[in-house]
Amino acid sequence: MASSPRAACLIGWPAAHSRSPIIHNYWLKQLGIPGNYGIEAVPPEGFAEFVAQLASRGYAGANVTIPHKEHALVLSQPDARASAVGAANTLWFDGATLRSTNTDVEGFIGNLDASAPGWDRAEEALVLGAGGSSRAVLFGLLDRGIKAIHLVNRTMERAQTLAAQFGDKVQPLAWGRAVEVMPRAGLLVNTTSLGQKGQPPLELSLDALPSSATVADLVYVPLVTPLLATAQARKLKTADGLGMLLHQAVRGFELWFGQRPQVTPELRALVEMDLTR
């Protein structure tokens, strides 16, 4: 690793709400690495030019968030994960080549491993939502060996289209039929914005889930969503959205700054404090 300070950033539009600088700058300080992580608010029409100038602006790489993830894929050399998910959230330089990946996959899986050990003993999973986040979840679950995934979405056509991209192990299902597969689901994942602060509630009974099931919610504002509160009341294992946010940041930091950081209780408490201010 070069001795001169390195820099990375988050590119989004808007981007000011991101907690990524808290995470990465904490790790830089903790590991004693000279560097900085900042935010770059870049509108869609300026994204390609900004990425082309990434190195000349002094950046070793970047995170990419809404609405740039699909465009980032086109402007870089994606790995298998980014290609399969159809979106990139992490850019880094391999020599002069700009490469990309999607760390939402390992963020989701890493958070489950940390929060609910043994979750992958489930043979079937129920996934709510067929948006961009759902792609990363589906890839991660299939990669981990889940045998059947029931993909539920309010728009059936969208669920069918996404399921077709991942093969026969992913079966689309109408939203109102979710309860039918719950008795067989060892894992339930909410990838929608329902239950998020300012969004409509996620109205879904968990009574039919087995007592051994794990419930994961990608929403992290509020920290304990109504879905997770209901699961915890039933004493089910849970994994929250903040955990995924923290774990997805690990690989990007390692690619840019050369050391693999750890997700610690101290870091989580720091981000929690910012979220609840």
Image (tube, rainbow, N blue to C red):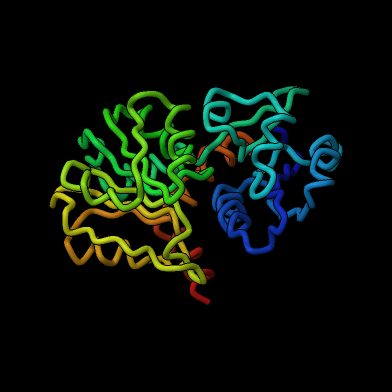
| Residue drawn 69% across the image and 58% down it | 15
Whole-percent x and y of residue 210? 14, 49
Q: Using the image as rendered, state which of residue 112 and residue 126 is in the foreground.
A: 126
Q: How many badges with numbers are in the image?
A: 0
Query: Does residue 73 show up?
Result: yes
Whole-percent x and y of residue 35? 70, 47
Left of 149 or right of it: where is 259? Answer: right
Q: Quadrant of residue 138?
A: top left
Q: Using the image as rendered, state which of residue 242 and residue 187 is in the foreground.
A: 187
Above or below residue 152? Residue 264 is below
Whole-percent x and y of residue 246? 48, 51
**Image quarter of the N terminus:** top right
| Residue drawn 17% across the image and 60% down it | 235
Left of 34 or right of it: where is 46? Answer: right
| Residue drawn 49% across the image and 70% down it | 197
Above or below residue 257? Residue 10 is below
| Residue drawn 17% across the image and 41% down it | 184
Residue at the outermost bottom position: 277
Whole-percent x and y of residue 141? 36, 34
Query: Does residue 36 show up?
Result: no
Left of 186 or right of it: where is 12? Answer: right
Above or below residue 245? Residue 273 is below
Q: Using the image as rendered, state which of residue 203 and residue 249 is in the foreground.
A: 203
